[in-house]
Image (cartoon, rainbow, N blue to C red):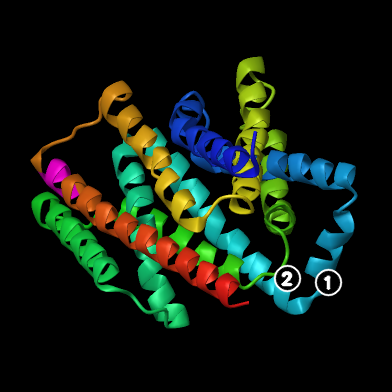
Amino acid sequence: MTQTGSGIAAVIAACVIWGLSPLYYRALDAVPPLEILAHRTFWSLVFFATLLGVQGRLGRLRAALSDRRSALIILAAALIISINWFLFIWAIHNARATEASLGYYIFPLVAVALGRIAFGERLDRLQIAAVALAVVAVSVLAVRQGALPWVSLVLATSFGIYGLLKKRLSVGAVTSVTGEVLLILPISAGYLLWLGLTGQGAFGADLGLALLLIGSGPVTALPLILFSHASQRVAYGTIGLLQYVNPTLQFLIATVIFREPFGTAQALAFGLIWAALALYSAALLRQERASKAASISVQNVT
């Protein structure tokens, strides 16, 4: 398999795992979301630390956390991604999986808007139109339902801010995520210890639940590793298009398997979002073609 083929396979595998994750967390419906989050953090750290240890890269983690600036960014990223993880689990447990899928659909558009605010990145006409359609879609849901789709907005915005923070780090994806779960370990481990001492914890009460809680670590870690592998081998535009596999699977699970309500307002909003993503994808492909053309031009000159 070629490098590109390997990268495409990796990003599809990562997005399929993410897309099917609602089924995994619905199987943990008997466990409170906060307890699941604590286990997810703890077992992710075990998995990542073991991986870095086997690869002999724990020194990179120590170096990243020794630098004050990097450590503060990693801590901020840890807090933001914890909010994102908790809200996603909460949404699955509270029949809001459709809203969660909408959040990951609009994430690329939120990321574009945040890039404009944070880095002054210029938006072309297609991107501006895409963001405008997303605003209209959110407005439709707000008017028809009498409230903002806050689950979608918080998921998309938190993941967008998380991405901005990660752009300011020079360390690798696996190293930075290991640092994130390590920094919030005292909170998660302390909470799990308290649950165990007071007899309220789900871990140990049922073997199946215990194995699922342990498995939340690899379920979190594996797609991140696959996505990191893909990002080094596949063009950004291609990754951007393939990422839609994730929310599409989540959407299908929410509507077909979980049978969550999907009325006129949701249909109109999702239609607008899909139209916005079509424009966004066209902009990505156009940028990728322009980048390739510029690269070829430079090679011909040299």
Q: Secondary structure at mark 1?
A: helix
Residue indicated by mark 2:
71
| Dominant SS type (magenta) | helix
Is 267 contained in the magenta span? yes
> What residue span does the magenta drawing correspond to?
265-269
Tag 1: residue type?
Ser
The x and y percentages for residue 89 are 46, 40
Q: Which residue is mark 1?
A: 66
Residue 36 % position (x, y):
57, 37
Q: Residue at x 73, y 70 (%)?
A: 71
Callout 1 environment at 10 Å: few (<14), some (14 to 19), or many (20+)?
Answer: few
Q: Foreground residue, 265 or 280?
A: 280
Q: Going by the image, does 61 lie left or right of 209? A: right
Amino acid, disc 2: Ala
Measuring 9% from the left and 51% from the top, which residue is drawn there? 144
Image spot of residue 222 (x, y percent) = 65, 38
Toward the top, the furthest residue is: 207
